Amino acid sequence: MNVKNVTENRKARHEYHIMETFEAGIALFGTEVKSLRAGKANLQDSFARVENAELMLYNMHISPYEQGNQFNHEPKRTRRLLMHKYEIMRLLGKTREKGLALIPLKVYFKNGLAKVELALAKGKKLYDRRDDIAAKDAKREMDRAMKERSKLNY
């Protein structure tokens, strides 16, 4: 299985509790595919929503392709995500729950096809973010102390 990462939404794991992840295909124009292969995409502030029994991705920025001339695409257009109908209906039921959203975590090519990793996520409160930062700092300090201690033993 040949997988090539294009872009990742690094802030998503900081701002949301990830409940579940899904893989979806993405319907693109030719110039969008070429821009993605060049790594010119941004997932910041993007989200997905179920509308008319279709899964749509909003605010994903794919830069226009340099050699695209008049056939270039709109950078922030709404893109259709490809999943089975029963999966979309399941996501629709889950997103109707209070506070759950569909957030794209990363875009990648798998066997030559563009894919999006979607997460069913719940927004973190400010104190949750602070707790995560404090836990990360404590772990870093502990690792540093263990490294120093192991250096002294040799």
Image (cartoon, rainbow, N blue to C red):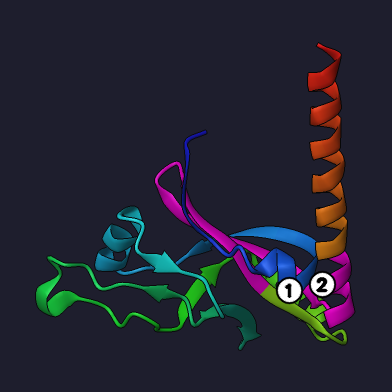
**Residue 114: quadrant of the picture:** bottom left
Instruction: Give the residue displayed 39% in from the left and 45% down from the top.
Output: 112
Q: Mark 2 points at which residue?
A: 129
Identify whether 66 is placed above or below 60: above
Classify 10 Å Cα crowding around label 1: few (below 14), some (14-19), many (20 and above). some
Residue 128 in the figure: left or right of residue 101: right
Q: Find numbered disc 1 in the image and state the secondary structure of the residue it sits on.
A: helix
Percent x, y of residue 106: 56, 59
**Residue 47: quadrant of the picture:** bottom right
Q: Find numbered disc 2 in the image and state the secondary structure of the residue it sits on.
A: helix
Instruction: Give the residue displayed 61% in from the left and 87% down from the top.
Output: 51
Q: Does the magenta stretch include residue 34?
A: no
**Residue 10: quadrant of the picture:** bottom right
Q: Give the range drawn in magenta.
A: 103-132
Instruction: Give the residue displayed 64% in from the left and 68% down from the top.
Output: 11
Question: The residue under label 1 is which amino acid type?
Answer: Glu
Question: Is the C terminus in the top left, top right, bottom left or bottom right quadrant?
Answer: top right
Q: Are marks 1 and 2 in contact (CB under 8 Å)?
A: yes
Which of the two labelled residues, at mark 1 and mark 2, occupies the earlier sequence position? 1
Instruction: Give the residue displayed 26% in from the left and 64% down from the top.
Output: 30
Q: Is the magenta stretch mostly helix, strand or loop?
A: strand
Q: Mark 1 points at which residue?
A: 15
Residue 13 in the figure: left or right of residue 108: right
Is residue 90 visible in this depiction of the protein? no
